[in-house]
Amino acid sequence: MPELQIRAATRDDAAPILEMVKELAAYERLLHTVQATEADLREALFGPRPVAEAIVADRGGRAVGFALYFHNYSTFIGRPGIYVEDLYVRPAHRGQGIGGALMRHIIRLARDRRCGRVEWAALEWNEPAIRFYEAMGAKALNEWRLFRLTQEAMEKV
């Protein structure tokens, strides 16, 4: 089996990342909500003002997983954090440590960047993901509730 490489995403990774975003959305029963395009990803990751970063798990020249993340900031601890928007490993490659390798890469980045924390969300019904995160030592923040304003809702404010 070819060696696994975790590397920073490049502009050429927009297509495979979008493909995996759609696979993740289908798994989460949210494929109908995906509007992103390759151009959107290239702009967000590599445009004049990047708003996110991504890493790719590459095995034998094929993207088998990815993580997309961005910085946030905690006024309470006075440090930036990293928010992991998506972490995904293709089904045929699960159980091989790839998800853990992606998370460890992000955690190393967070330490190198003097971040105070790494955060993400998981769907309540996604028990495999929840077990994976808890095995890493992550704790669910049950006292917090996630809120969202959609583009449509923002236009009404």
Image (tube, rainbow, N blue to C red):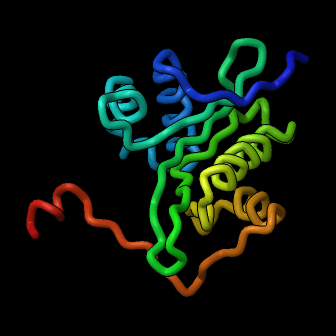
| 12 over 22 or under it: above or below | above
Point out residue 140 in the picture as x, y percentages from the top left corner. Answer: 66, 75
Point out residue 125 in the picture as x, y percentages from the top left corner. Answer: 63, 65
| 112 over 122 or under it: above or below | above
Point out residue 1 in the picture as x, y percentages from the top left corner. Answer: 90, 17
| 157 over 58 or under it: above or below | below
**Which residue is nearer to you in this view: 98 or 125?**
98
Q: Which residue reaches farthest right?
A: 1
**Which quadrant would residue 123 be assigned to in this image?**
bottom right
Point out residue 55 in the picture as x, y percentages from the top left corner. Answer: 61, 34
Q: Which residue reaches farthest bottom?
A: 143
Q: Quadrant of the C terminus?
A: bottom left
Number of callouts: 0
| Left or right for 75, reference 47 | right
**Which residue is nearer to you in this view: 78 or 88?**
78
Look at the image and tell me whether residue 129 can be seen. Answer: yes
**Which residue is nearer to you in this view: 75 or 20?**
75
Q: Which residue reaches farthest left?
A: 156
| Left or right for 49, reference 99 | left
* Image point (55%, 47%), residue name: 86
Look at the image and tell me whether residue 122 can be seen. Answer: no
* Image point (54%, 42%), residue name: 68
* Image point (10%, 60%), residue name: 155
* Image point (76%, 25%), residue name: 5
**Which quadrant would residue 47 be assigned to in this image?**
top left
| Left or right for 127, reference 21 | right
